[in-house]
Image: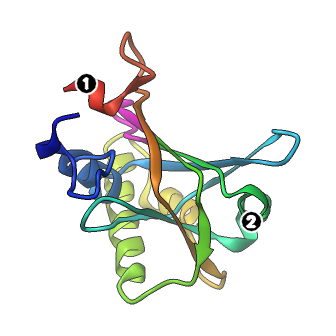
Amino acid sequence: MPEDSRSARGALIDAEHAAFLATAGVSISVGACNAERLPSVTRAIGCRVADDRSRVTVFVVVAQSREVLDDLRANSRIAVAFSEPHTHRTVQLKGEDAVAEALIDGDLRHIERYRDAFTAELGALGYSPLFTRTLLDCSGGEVVAVSFTPAAAFSQTPGPKAGTPLGDLR
């Protein structure tokens, strides 16, 4: 990958992909697996990408994500798919150092911006705001940040380039 498309620290995602992950109205699915390689999955309710794009953080509701969080505590391996409903454009990131952390200042704003963007995205497809806000509801539940360093990044948009590493698409 050309140096100008990566951060100084060698991040796998460029600025355009970082914006897609963190600000677009994408559906975010977080996957993990246990020691027997049985999968677990949960929905994230937002994303934060570090300024240098070296770390990605997704937000999950603990009560809905216990199995994923248990699997991440056991082995730290994570796969996250970001998919734009109206185009099916999809990016998958994988990491091997995922850790659940407390929210930091500004994370609740990230979650609210995500909720607004995803509500607008699904609204354009005919889903009511009530449906989307209910789907992403975290009121009354503990939310944690799951942070990881992307070790692999792929386009998973359906079509002939699905599975292609992001750097090979340039």
Residue 91 on the magenta span: yes
* Quadrant of the image containing the N terminus: top left
Residue at 65 percent of width and 51 percent of height: 77
Q: What's the magenta region?
A: 82-92
Quick one: which residue is furthest to the left in this view? 4
Which residue is tagged 2? 73
Residue 136 sits above or below residue 152 on the image: below
Residue, x 66% and y 81% (percent of image)? Answer: 141
Residue 79 horizontal/vertical position (percent): 57, 45
Above or below residue 88? Residue 61 is below
Label 1: few (<14), some or many (≥20) within 10 Å? Answer: few
Q: Residue at x 47, y 46 (%)?
A: 151
Q: Secondary structure at mark 1?
A: helix
Instruction: Determine whether, in the image, residue 54 is placed left or right of residue 34.
Output: left
Q: Which mark is residue 125?
A: none
Q: In x, y percent, where is residue 129?
A: 42, 60
Compared across the picture, whether 13 is left or right of 105 comes to left
Q: Residues within 10 Å of mark 2 (few under 14, many from 20)?
A: some
Kind of residue sitting beneath label 1 = Leu
Provide residue 5's location: percent of width, then percent of height: 16, 43
The residue nearer to you, when weighing 152 against 71, is: 152
Q: Is residue 7 left or right of residue 122?
A: left
Q: Toward the viewer: 139 or 24?
A: 24
Q: Secondary structure at mark 2?
A: helix
Mark 1 touches mark 2? (CB < 8 Å): no
Identify residue for label 1.
Answer: 169
